[in-house]
Image (cartoon, rainbow, N blue to C red):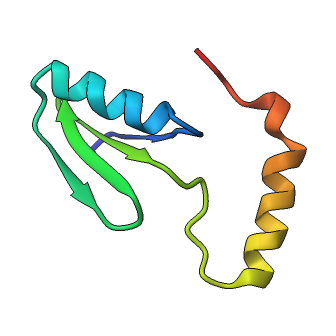
Amino acid sequence: MSVAIYWYFEDLGYSKAREFIKNKNLKFKYTAAFSLDYEWNEINIEHHKRLFDIKSPFKYEYLSKIQDKYKDKQQEH
């Protein structure tokens, strides 16, 4: 069984996280849809700039409403 962690960063969070892993000399690769991934302690980690990567404007509008509805439930550190 493989383990993966997916992180979503708003605003400047993605850039800050990318700089953090660069400073830790972790090897990462850029992937599609404004993302990057790397291995840490045998765990696949992905960083994403977008919570949803949906091309349909109709679906995107609906998913944006869901994201806004639950915004206060997001974890921040």
> Can you see residue 41?
no
Rendered residue at 17%/20% (across/down): 23
Q: Position of residue 36 (x, y in %)?
A: 29, 49
- Residue at 31 percent across and 34 percent down: it is 18
Count of labels in the image: 0
Is residue 77 left or right of 35 when viewed as pictured?
Answer: right
Image point (61%, 62%), residue name: 52
Query: Please, which residue is most extreme toward the top here?
Result: 77
Q: Is residue 16 above or below residue 1?
A: above
Q: Position of residue 55 (x, y in %)?
A: 60, 81
**Residue at the (18%, 28%) spot, across then down:** 22
The x, y position of residue 70, in whole percent, is: 84, 41
Quarter placement of the C terminus: top right
The quarter in which the N terminus is drawn is top left
On screen, residue 15 versus residue 26, left or right, reads right
| Residue 25 occupies quadrant | top left
- 37, above or below 30, in the image: above
- Does residue 48 appear anywhere in the picture? yes
The residue nearer to you, when weighing 13 against 40, is 13
- Which picture quadrant has residue 59? bottom right
Q: Is residue 7 left or right of residue 27?
A: right
Image spot of residue 39 (x, y percent): 18, 37
